[in-house]
Image (cartoon, rainbow, N blue to C red):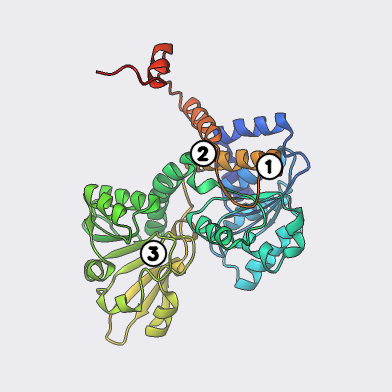
Amino acid sequence: MDGLVEKGVMRLEWARSHMPVLAKVKEELKDSGALQGMKISMALHTEAKTGILALTLKEAGAKVRLASCNPLSTDDCVAVALNERYGLETYAKKGESDEEYYQHMNKILDLGPDILIDDGTDAISLVHTKRQDVLEGILGANEETTTGIVRLQAMAKEGVLRFPVMDVNNADMKHLFDNRYGTGQSTFDGIMTSTNIQISGKAFVVGGYGWCGRGIAMRARGMGARVMVTEIDPVKAVEARMDGFDVMPMAMAAPHADFIVTATGCKNIVAPEHFPLLKDGCIMANSGHFDNEIDRVGLDEAAQKRRVRESVDEYLFPDGKKLYLLAEGRLVNLAAGQGHPVEIMDMSFAIQALCAKYMAENHGSLSPAVYKVPEDIDEHVAWLELDSMAIDIDQLTPEQEKYLNSWQEGT
């Protein structure tokens, strides 16, 4: 156990030393006192960067409990270290059963939270269904994933959402970097760690061309793959083609694919009708939040499964064809890799922390709905990031400001 704790401490302190933006935000939170005494329940991927966010909120005066938002995304040494060395109540382990997953989720809700910080909206969903006993005390929440925001917008549309939620996912300083550069890099961390297979020269299919898909496609091309993109949105499909990628339906891409990676936030992107089309040896992975983008149940029913390498399951079909699924179809970047780069999460978690402060200070004027992150929070984090990178940029002169705010001057 001591070895596990020390390993977790090293990972946490390494992350902390590369998160200067969040360090500055922590001082702002402490100075404001906005989170002093607040009870914050967090359902996030329990690894080093998330641990530093949780410790930041704790050091700013909040009472914090942390659970994982995915059964396979916990770094056990970090979870143990948070409990044993830092005194932060953490309920998470890698490979949780469904029963354990919801036991841990209920543990963080037993805190009686003022604020929820969620990833995927399982915690928010739970307090609207089986844990309504804690609803009245919740001032508001943050949600940081595309999948979670889709769920929340459906709740708001149906009129069942009971408190305000900040859409952290669509903050510019989150999705432009976290979703694109973070997912792009960390997806390949998971793929390479689990397979040790070459990317260069392979046919690589990306399911979805949102910000995550953009990042994955960009990295795949940079590593020498021939990249094909599948989409349902005509605008994103045009963008993918203009970015230089082949665009086609999954049924057309499947016969060529050496790799398929999904990142859509929707289910059954690779479905049973695609299995006969896939060639022998195709490797499939998912970087979307839930494990339903690749139909794992359909695979289990159609083929014989065996574990052939850590995080790699082989599916043997009656005709002798073999397909491979990474990380049980869960987030490959966290289930088989170390997640997003530290510096990327420094920006995302600075947004999270400042949105928790905003919710604590403004919840009384917010009705139950999904809210955009205020532009001043986005801009503040951008300035902090530039400062951490020692980058200066130009400022508008008074004459330029006047020009941009007038209409008289023209040709």
Residue 130, given in percent of the width and then of the height, sits at: 70, 69
Q: Quadrant of residue 315?
A: bottom left
Helix, strand or loop for disc 3: strand
Between 254 and 151, the residue placed more toward the observer is 151
Q: What's the amino acid at mark 1?
A: Ser
Helix, strand or loop for disc 1: helix
Mark before the other along the chain sequence, 1 or 2: 2
Inter-mark Cα distance, 1 to 3: 43 Å
| Disc 2: which residue | 347
Inter-mark Cα distance, 1 to 2: 27 Å
Q: Residue furthest bottom?
A: 318
| Disc 1: which residue | 365
Residue 201, given in percent of the width and then of the height, sits at: 21, 57
Residue 129, given in percent of the width and then of the height, sits at: 67, 68
Residue 183 located left or right of residue 218: right
Q: Residue at x 37, y 53 (%)?
A: 210
Q: Residue at x 25, y 52 (%)?
A: 238
Between 363 and 305, the residue placed more toward the observer is 363
Mark before the other along the chain sequence, 1 or 3: 3
Q: What's the amino acid at mark 3?
A: Ala
Crowd band around label 3 with a 10 angstrom C-alpha radius: few (<14), some (14–19), many (20+): many
| Disc 3: which residue | 285
Q: Residue at x 27, y 60 (%)?
A: 204
Helix, strand or loop for disc 2: helix
**Mark in the foreground, 1 or 2:** 1
